[in-house]
């Protein structure tokens, strides 16, 4: 894994965490970004060194997912199985799907397969393999719709 791939991976994980905080605490966007820039991305937390993230990429995913949330949620809602809604999803899962969907919609510079794979890896950090497969299936459907 190259340094830039590691930095993108860290940016994606950080973006999901920032989107979760935004969802749960309604932290103002400027405050949220500043907190992550200064205290989370690349920091040592509980004796664990967090990877340095590509800040511009992190900022784009967080800002973009928040700005386009309504469009993202409409698209995601249409890709869930019948009887499922976004409200039924775990809050962390929802942020993984929002970040991944934003990237698939807005970041044509990132190959769809790479974005999907990265968010499946993020899902593995929080969930069991079954949920990671769910992320793969939903983001694959999103990619087919937007690319």
Image: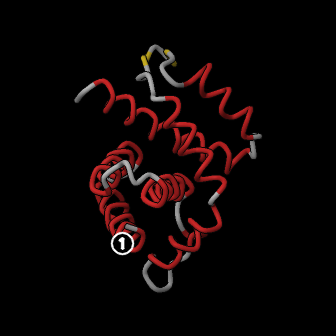
Q: Secondary structure at mark 1?
A: helix
Q: Residue at x 42, y 58 (%)?
A: 104
Q: What colour scheme does the image use?
A: secondary structure
Q: Quadrant of residue 8?
A: top left
**Residue under the point 32% across and 57% down:** 112
Q: Is residue 11 above or below residue 49?
A: below
Asked if residue 130 is positioned above or below residue 66 in the image, the reply reads below
Residue 90 horizontal/vertical position (percent): 53, 59
Q: Which residue is mark 1?
A: 141
Residue at x-position 46% and y-position 35%: 11
On the image, the x and y values in percent for residue 71 come to: 60, 68
Is residue 102 positioned above or below 20 on the image? below
Residue 74 location in percent, x, y? 58, 74
Residue 52, quarter of picture: top left
Seen from this angle, which residue lies furthest front? 109
Front residue of this view, candidates 4 and 95: 4
Residue 57 coordinates in the image, percent (x, y): 49, 37
Residue 11 vs residue 140: left or right?
right
Residue 39 falls left or right of residue 108: right
Taking the image as shown, residue 113 lies to the left or right of residue 101, namely left
Q: Depth check: 119 or 67 in front?
A: 67
Image quarter (top left, top right, bottom left or bottom right) of the N terminus = top left
Q: Quadrant of the C terminus?
A: bottom left
């Amino acid at each position: 894994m190259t340094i830039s791939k590691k930095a993108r991976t860290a940016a994606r994980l950080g973006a999901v965490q920032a989107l979760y905080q935004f969802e749960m605490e309604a932290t103002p966007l400027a405050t949220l970004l500043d907190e992550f820039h200064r205290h989370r991305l690349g920091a040592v937390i509980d004796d664990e060194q967090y990877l340095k993230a590509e800040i511009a990429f992190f900022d784009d995913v967080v800002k973009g997912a928040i700005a386009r949330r309504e469009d993202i949620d409409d698209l995601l809602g249409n890709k869930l199985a019948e009887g499922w809604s976004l409200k039924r999803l775990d809050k962390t899962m929802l942020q993984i799907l929002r970040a991944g969907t934003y990237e698939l919609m807005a970041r044509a510079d990132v190959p769809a397969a790479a974005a999907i794979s990265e968010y499946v890896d993020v899902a593995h950090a929080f969930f069991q393999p079954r949920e990671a497969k769910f992320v793969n299936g939903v983001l694959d459907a999103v990619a087919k719709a937007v690319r």
